[in-house]
Amino acid sequence: MLWFGFLACTGSSAIELGGGRPEDTDDGRSGVEVRDTAPDRLPGDSSPDTGEATGVDDPDLYLPGEIMELSLDLERGAYDALRRDGREYVEAALGWDGRSWPVAIHIKGSSSWQEISEKPSLVVDVNRVDPEQSFRGTRKFYLHNDCYDPSQMSETLAYGFYREWGYPASRTTFVHLTLDGEDYGLYTLVEPHEDPFLEEWFADPNGNLYENRDAYCDVDDLRCMEVEQSDEGSDEAIGRFGAASKRSGSEWRPAVEPLLDWPRFIDSLALEITIVHWDSYSYDLSNYSVYHEPSTDRWTFLTQSMDLDFGYRPWSYPNCGEYGMDIDKYTMGSLAAGCRADEACMAELVERVSFYADQLEAADGAARVRELDAFIGEAVKDDPRRYWSDREYDTHVECLQQFFVDRPAQLREWVAAQGG
């Protein structure tokens, strides 16, 4: 979800992949652990290694090591309907492995918006037509066109790090899409923040979920916080949360700490810094949701649309590792700024950045990029609707490898400057 209008995007195989993974560690913090990941997974993937856990004929949608061949065949009149208003659902037939599911789809995105005749990102709702059905264990998924990411790796890498390090984040996989018989190329399939996601990460998944709908929208402004899930039946909790977020000085931490899953809050700030996820809550008030767990009355920040990470901002900084690198500018969100102004919170943030510097180094992101290049590189270059040239793809892949070599030392330098 980008909010700048001056640059808009324009116009099956299976393998076993190895790669460096950090050793399974537990740093002793309540609710935070680094998850174990098997070495034969797709780089960045942390879904359970269950094989065909949901049945031989219907394996898990997020099994690693596969570029799925999916097709969408629109119902009569649906193509023209999407041309008129792409945000309205239309019916289609989802095809995979010789089988078919009736589904509903619509176009998604803001500045990444593309018409149905180009290469749009899509929402695929599997049980909107038939509430009883699912597709490979899921009821809804997103197909992202990755139009800002020359490598088409960013979401897989970024979400994968979050999940691997124990923070709530979506699963991903890769799809080769055919729509009405036309080749639409390679997509990243992303898990939405819906009930199955909440059930995985929260003991109580029956709370309210809000997404920032507009640019520069903070948690205290209900006019721009869009309700995604309203199981609690009122906005009373977010009203209290928003009011607390605006406290300052000695009143700030006593007001906000009881309302936040505190370890996750510190981690959310540290993770955005670690992977330079500048298109985020703390850097530019973008691409986040907040979930309220009613049984604990605590809030968790969730990130989304992670196609711009690793210091990359294509419309003004053509290389990764350039934009959003200044750690001291991750203060736009009121809660991020409040943490920086609170001595104890700042000390915790510095400690977590130091911790994640070690995790990032151990993860060997450069090796993961090389594995992903071997896995999807040919599919990226064969995509007839791609946005980037072969040279731009190759340059960005090289840049990402260098980012992962350089970033741990940059983080440690900042930590040392804070006295950590």
Image (tube, rainbow, N blue to C red):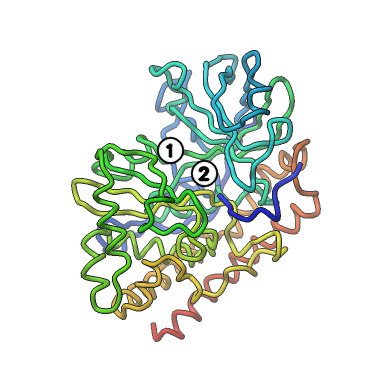
Please name the amino acid that badge 2 sits on: Asp
Name the foreground residue: 98 vs 370: 98
Q: Position of residue 225 (x, y in %)?
A: 41, 49
Dot 1: element: loop
Label 1 or label 2, whichever comes before in sequence order: 2
Number of the label disc, if any, that sits on residue 40: 2
Helix, strand or loop for disc 2: loop
Q: Are marks 1 and 2 in contact (CB under 8 Å)?
A: yes
Most foreground residue, 13 or 337: 337
**Residue 35 visible in the current orientation:** no
Identity of the residue drawn at 48% across and 48% down: 213
Q: Looking at the rendering, which quadrant does residue 200 occupy?
A: top left
Mark 1 lies on residue: 49
Does residue 356 lie above or below 410 as drawn?
A: above
Between 180 and 114, which is closer to the camera in this rendering? 114
In this orientation, which residue lies closer to the viewer: 378 or 113? 113
The number of numbered discs placed on residues in the rendered structure image is 2
In the image, is residue 30 above or below residue 119?
below
Residue 416 in the image: x percent, y percent?
Answer: 45, 84
Hey, which quadrant is residue 381 in on the image?
A: top right
Q: Is residue 395 rendered to the left or right of residue 411?
A: right
